[in-house]
Image (spheres, rainbow, N blue to C red):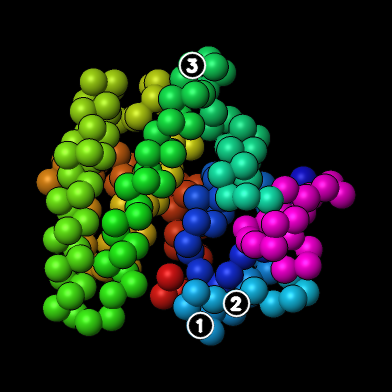
Amino acid sequence: MSVKLYYFDARGICDPIRMILTYGGIEFDEIRAPVDTFPPNLPTEIKSKCRWGQVPMVEFDGKSLNQSLAITRYFAKKANLVPQDIYEAALCDEYVDAVRDLMAPWYVAVMENDEQKKQEKIDEARKATKTRFLDVFESIVKLNDGKHLVGKSLTWADIYLAYIIQHFEILLGVNIASEHPTLKTLSENVLNEPNIKKWIDRRPKTKY
């Protein structure tokens, strides 16, 4: 399979896709649009290719696929990161959706330029996400096998959560799972998985 992946020159919501592609041994070429402003503007030649006028977008086998979660889930299936059991597969979907909700308060802190106000937004994000999300994820992993969100092997939900924990640590210098040792261990295990680590070690260094 030859894959062409379109996104910005950033980790963003595309890095879980890159991690999964690398994990699955699926070769891909990247077309990265520059991040000159924030939010960044997508060049017309890329935007015109995208069904909804936004990235990420992938092309493969004469087809295209748009929307980040659809792409992530598609390649997760290709890489055997989606459980065969349909309930467990749905749990992965649920947990990834919850991770996306968890992200919102932290992005508010990322967008703040004033350092004092940024710290206030970080404190607010901790308060908003601890009980509602992080405590729940901690409990889910503990009640499962202490290593994974779903089942007894790596799934795309594990990768998505581990990536987001790392992403905000890079963006804000804050380990959002610092009070959640089971999540911290899960994240470290995922990011040190040999094929995923291959991507982390070679990915371009970007602000976002």
* Mark 1 residue type: Thr
* Pointer 3 residue: 87
Q: Is residue 111 visible?
A: yes
The image's mark for residue 37 is 1
Q: Residue at x 29, y 59 (%)?
A: 106
* Pointer 2 residue: 41
13 or 203: nearer the viewer? 13
> Alpha carbon of mark 3 to alpha carbon of mark 2: how far?
39 Å
* Mark 3 residue type: Tyr
Give percent across and percent down for residue 43.
69, 77
Q: Residue at x 39, y 51 (%)?
A: 163
Q: Nearer the viewer, mark 3 or mark 1?
A: 1
The boundaries of the magenta stretch are: 47-65
The mark that comes first in sequence, 3 or 2, is 2
- Find residue 147 and report its image quarter: top left
Please rate how many residues cluster around mark 2, counting C-alpha atoms within 10 Å: few if below 14, some from 14 to 19, many from 20.
some
